[in-house]
Amino acid sequence: MKVLIVGSGGREHAIAWKVAQSPKVDKIYCAPGNAGIEQVAECVPIGAMEFDKLAAFAKDNAIDLTVIGMDDPLVGGIVDVFEAEGLRVFGPRKNAAILEGSKAFSKDLMKKYNIPTAAYENFSSAQEALEYLETAKMPIVLKADGLALGKGVLICNTLEEAKAGVKELMLDKHFGNAGNTIVIEEFMTGREVSVLSFVDGDTIKIMTSAQDHKRAKDGDQGLNTGGMGTFSPSPFYTKEVDEFCQKYIYQPTVDAMKAEGRPFKGIIFFGLMLTADGPKVLEYNARFGDPETQVVLPRMKNDIVDVFEACVDGTLDQIELDFEDNAAVCVVLASDGYPEHYEKGYPIEGLERFENQDGYYVFHAGTKKADNMFVTNGGRVLGVTAKGADLKQARANAYAATEWIQFANKYKRNDIGKAIDEA
């Protein structure tokens, strides 16, 4: 069969790499893709938001299944466009992708269906938000309602910071229209855990857990990024936590979306906070996480195409997900200065070291080909992933592998998975 993957980052490289392992698949396309994805798929110069062009390409090339990797096209309604053309596509429709597309919607959904989350209020008026903050308890969290590249969350320790945050989101439009409405919610403390799941509208199957590192600098300092590294599984995601979440969070979310007339098919990413009062939902995403995908899929034993098709066909109850009894760590190699100002176009050396190295992977996020060699072309350049018998071994392997690669202004955090040592 022929598969089209929509997206251009490390997540899509990991998906393409996994799809390529399926004996069912004999041709993979990726739009627009990147230089690393070209190693396993034919890249097509069509943007992720060019829905009509993508659907036409899928029809013209007899694509059997399209997999949408990115949030923007999902929230924008790409699945609806493909389905209207009679094309098979993996991902939620527009009315279900709102689970990620609107923080206010998802918070209201959780309140209505008693799904554990932080106390909150929604505001479309900056003045009302500022008045509310005068009586609020600090620290407090401000969230842009819409998509903001994973960066539209501000943790404010003082009233002054919170007021400045409202100005940044709602008045200065730092994230554009994403800040027209904001969510102000209580600050929760605890361990953060990411849990990815497959959903077919009725049934939900949980993948292995992971833990992301969002801040740019060691010790969770610096600005929020798209993710500087991750590890799987999380030692804090215990059997007891899983049982609680299955009962009060996972299935109730799927049932709530169905009850709202928004049946969800695709990936639900649960961002959880393990608080003293039990697990609570920090956020939902409507697609694979990045870079969580880069540690979850290398541990997955299933043919991922079988799972994608079961979600589309509503037969996920017949699938048993199976993951290796080991661990994986991904360290992101970024351009120094990310997420603000950084230089691009530097040659990358050492990628050949990963060829035929069992348990070591390098997923391209921001690269391109120039003069027949790979060069840096983004803030997050590469995701270096390694497996190990346990998390400590996987972490040691991943950091060793980061030294195989060299490029000017290479930057990484040095404490990805350090929480492992404290578990």
Image (cartoon, rainbow, N blue to C red):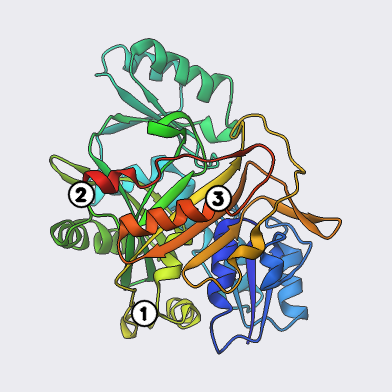
Q: For this view, does 407 lie left or right of residue 255?
A: right
Report which quarter residue 395 is drawn in.
bottom left
Name above or below for residue 55 compared with residue 295.
below
**Answer yes or no: do the residues labelled 1 and 2 have beta carbons within 8 Å?**
no
Compare marks 1 and 2 and give the one earlier in the sequence. 2
Compare marks 2 and 3 and give the one earlier in the sequence. 2
Most foreground residue, 388 or 340? 388
What is the secondary structure assignment of the residue under circle 3? loop
Q: Which residue is mark 2?
A: 114
Give the number of the disc on residue 316. Answer: 1
Compare marks 1 and 3 and give the one earlier in the sequence. 1
Name above or below for residue 183 compared with residue 368.
above
Q: Position of residue 290 (x, y in %)?
A: 50, 53
Most foreground residue, 274 or 119? 274
What is the secondary structure assignment of the residue under circle 1? helix
Mark 1, Cα crowd under 10 Å, few <14 / some 14-19 / many 20+, is: many
